[in-house]
Each structure stands twice: as C-alpha cells, then as structure tokens.
Image (cartoon, rainbow, N blue to C red):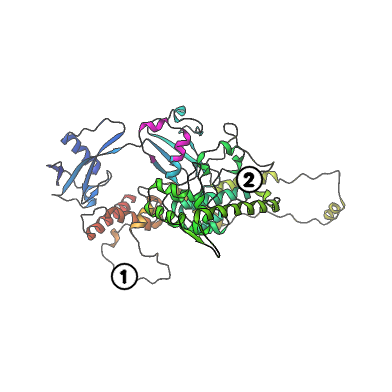
Amino acid sequence: MRVVISSEGSCEPFDVPPDQTVGAMKQMVKENFLVHFSDDKQIRQYLELSYGGAALQDGWALCDVGIRSGSVIQCLIKSEQRPLMRVFNAVTGKTFLIMGSNALLQMSVAGLKSVVSKQSGLPVSTFRLSTPAGVQLYDCNQLQDYAIEVGTTLRLDTWDGWVEFLQGCLMGHRLTVQSHLSEKKPVMRFQLQVALYIASSLGHLDLAGWLLERGVHAEEPVGVHPYRMWCHQTSHRDTGKCPIHIAAESSQLLILKLFINKNPLNLACRDPEGHDPLKVALQRGDRDCVRYLANKVYSVVSLSNISLPMRLYLQVKRWMSLGQNRAASNKCQYTNAAFKARVEDKELVDGFSRPNMSSKSRKSMTKLSRGIKAKALQPLSPNSNLFSISDLIFRRAALPSLQPVNPGDSIEMQNKWKQDLNRRKDCQLEEDSSSNKGKFALPPITRKNVTRPEFVDASPKSSRIPTVSLESLSHHCCRTPRENAMYCLTTASTFTEKPWLKQLKIARILIRRRAHNMD
C-alpha cells in the first residue's frame, strides 16, 4: 500500500506492506529525508510519527492502528532535555528523573536528598541513596566524591520491613498503614510521624485525620529513626521540617485547614530556616494557601472577657502548652521511658555498622526472624545422670510421640498463588495502570451467580476463535484481562482525531493481536 509522509510542508509517498512496523518506517524516513540529529549531550532529538493525533510506537504495525492506503502520516523532529540523573525507587518500583544543568553535579549529597525527597514524597530520614555499584552516599560528601556522571541511575532504598508500610502511606490506605506498624514503640512512633508527613505532602485527608486522632502532632518534626537518635545533631537539615510545613510547600489547602482547626499553634511553627507556614506558602506562590493563612494569622480571637490578636493569643497558648508538657513529663517520667533509647537498643554508625536499609519486605523479615527463633529453640538432649520425680512419673507412662503433619493441598495452592502474584509485580508494564484506571471506568466485575444469555445457534466460524484461557493471558501480558482492556482502550483513546467507534476498533485490534501472539 502507498502512504504519504508529511514533514515541514513537503510530502513524500512510500510503498510499504500493511504489516510494516513503525520502527522500520522511521528508518526509511531517516534515509529518505536525510535526517540529522544534534550531538548535544543535554538535549535529545528523536523522530516521531503521528497519525490521527496519536504518536505511533515503534512496535506497532501500520494495519493495527487503522492506517490504510492513501493515509497521511505526520513526521516531526522533537527535542527534549536529557535528565541529569535517574533514581530508581525501590518502594514503588518506578524510576523518576532529576532534571537540571550540569552545575547540579557540584552539589552535596544532602542537597540531592532534598530534591529526591520532594519528588518522591518521602522524608529524608526514611531512605538512603546508593550508586549502581552499591556504594552508599553520605550527606556530608559531595557528588564529585563518588564520580557520578550525567545519566547515572541511583537507587533509593528504605528500612527493612518498611516497604508495605510506605506503599500504604503513598496510596493513603489507612488499614494498610495500621497493619504494618512496628511492634516496637519508638519505631512505631517514628512511623506515625512519617505517615503524617507523607499524607501532608500528597493530600491524603482521611489518613491525616486518623493520625491526628491517634495523637500525632503536625507541629512536631519528623526527626530520625530511633536507631540513629544518638547522632541527630549531625542529621540532615530537612529532618526538622514538620508536616504543617510540608502541607504549605505542597499547596495542600485542605490539609492546612485540618491541622490549624485541630491546633492553632501550627500557625507559629518554625522550620529549620525559621519560616512559619505563611512564609513557606509565600515562597511557594500558592494564592489560596497564602490567603487562608494570612486571614488566620491576622485575625482576632474573641474570648469570654477579652479579644486578643492571633499572634498574642498564640504566644499565650504556647506558654501554656510548654507548662502543661513539663508538668506531664514530670508525672509520667516512668511511662514515657518506653519511647526513649535504652541500653540494649541497636545503634547505627555510618561506615562501621551494616545499614538495615535494603528495602526488604516485611514478609521476608518475618520469615528470617522465624528461622532464627527456630534454630535458637532446638530441644535439649536429655541428661542421663540427673532425674527429677516428675521425670520418673512420666517414664512409667510412656506417652506416644506426636508425628509431624504433612502440609495439605491448600498450602501448595496458596504458595503457587503467591508466586504468580510476585511474578506479576516484577513484570514491567508498558504504561502505568493507575493512569489507565483514571481514564476508563469499566463495568463492575460480574459474579458467577449472575445469569448470562445462552447462544442457541453457534457461528460456523466459531472454531477459528482463539481459545486462550484467562490465566495464560494474564501470565503473558502481566496484567489481568480487565487491566489489559483498560490499557488497550487508553492507547486507542490517544487517536483524538478519530471518532469513538474507530478508537474502539483499534482497541479491539490491539487485544486480538495480543491474543494471536500467544498461539
């Protein structure tokens, strides 16, 4: 078939087969139009073919996206700035880009962690950065000390056993956060403060409200892990930021209202640079947050017999709060000892002790601890020399020993299901499934008890329909059939110049192509 390539006002016909891929078509265009790209290391130029308002991917065939003889394909040369470096987030399994000039390579590791914290939404005290060779980056060093170049991919790891907890915080799932809290009280207290920090950054109102009900304060800094409490004086500067400051930086107006209605003292809270939430919002430039905070700061508080400006009221309130906290600490000095460091607690020293930040899941940590406990609780060998009266009594009545019970078939099926689930998580998707869910709302999943229509007359060509099971489709595409339908519909919706029925036809062709590739 003959298609027309349009580039910068000129058109050129090409005779190509219907099953020609877009990648091969790009190579033909480069050779015919003599396309040359720039050699600049900071700017990447690439060739893009578009049809129907959508950018064509290299692996697509022309006939799969509705390109027929006489179709006109647009050819564009686009340029984008190359990322300075990449960071692989072991918590989410995704890689995000660090943009900027080469001057950022002269910054310190602490400055880079601040940038990574803003993009990932995680506090700086919950992760560490390492080079591709596995060398940990310390805050006091410069990036030049690790020979980091443009395009380097760093790795972000969190504390062992925290992966599920941080995933629940990032998604705003309260039950997930609650079920993955640590059993140690100091660590649990730190986790609750981290959860409020993330909820303030991402605007999870339900999670933030639940944490405030549990006694977490928005005017308290996140701090450092209890294992590193001994060196908090030399910790990262951003560990002194409070959730109220993060809400102002992220322009989360509803979170700000929740915090200030809970405790007006949040208006006078200072970050490590001495800025209150109003100053932070002014630097951010969000008009709604600035208007709300300014109205609160410069308002008047009416009491029973007197009216005070908000600033004076906050000073009186802070004095009262300090006195109440000091009195409470004197009365409860023994009950608060559980939240303080003890002699037998573990301490981490940079460069000497092995860091517990390798992003291990909580399941693997529990399995490891169970194995250690099983080895420690081995039965002792009987002593043949000394016998007690109870031993003699039990020797007369020889009791039958218990036999180990073999695991049933249900345990094998459960292990197989877990392996399939882990394999599906490890597989990399071509597109983010979360964005696909936001664009198309498919009908709810039908249950088995719902009656379906019966087909009386079968089509004579029904034997040609590919009989592919749902399990094999999910294994091949690393998606459930529902997620695969969302992906194909979202891909077809990028053809904005085509009517809806044409988009639906393209989606059906993509699904059929995937099913035929499995046969």
For the record, the magenta segment spans: 97-114
The residue at the point 61 percent across, 51 percent down is 322
Which element type, helix, strand or loop, lies under badge 2? helix
Residue, disc 2 = 371
In depth, the one of 228 and 271 nearer the eye is: 271
Horizontal and vertical percent position of residue 286: 38, 51
Please tell me which of labels 1 and 2 falls first in the chain: 2
The residue at the point 46 percent across, 32 percent down is 108
In depth, the one of 171 and 468 nearer the eye is: 171
Q: Indicate which label's residue lies in the foreground, 1 or 2.
A: 2
Horizontal and vertical percent position of residue 360: 53, 44
Can residue 11 be seen by looking at this rendering? Answer: no
Residue farthest along the right direction in this orientation: 389
Q: Amino acid at mark 1?
A: Phe
Q: Is residue 85 left or right of residue 371?
A: left
In depth, the one of 513 and 490 nearer the eye is: 490
State the mark number for residue 455.
1
Badge 2, how many Cα within 10 Å: few under 14, some, many 20+?
few
Residue farthest along the front direction in this orientation: 306
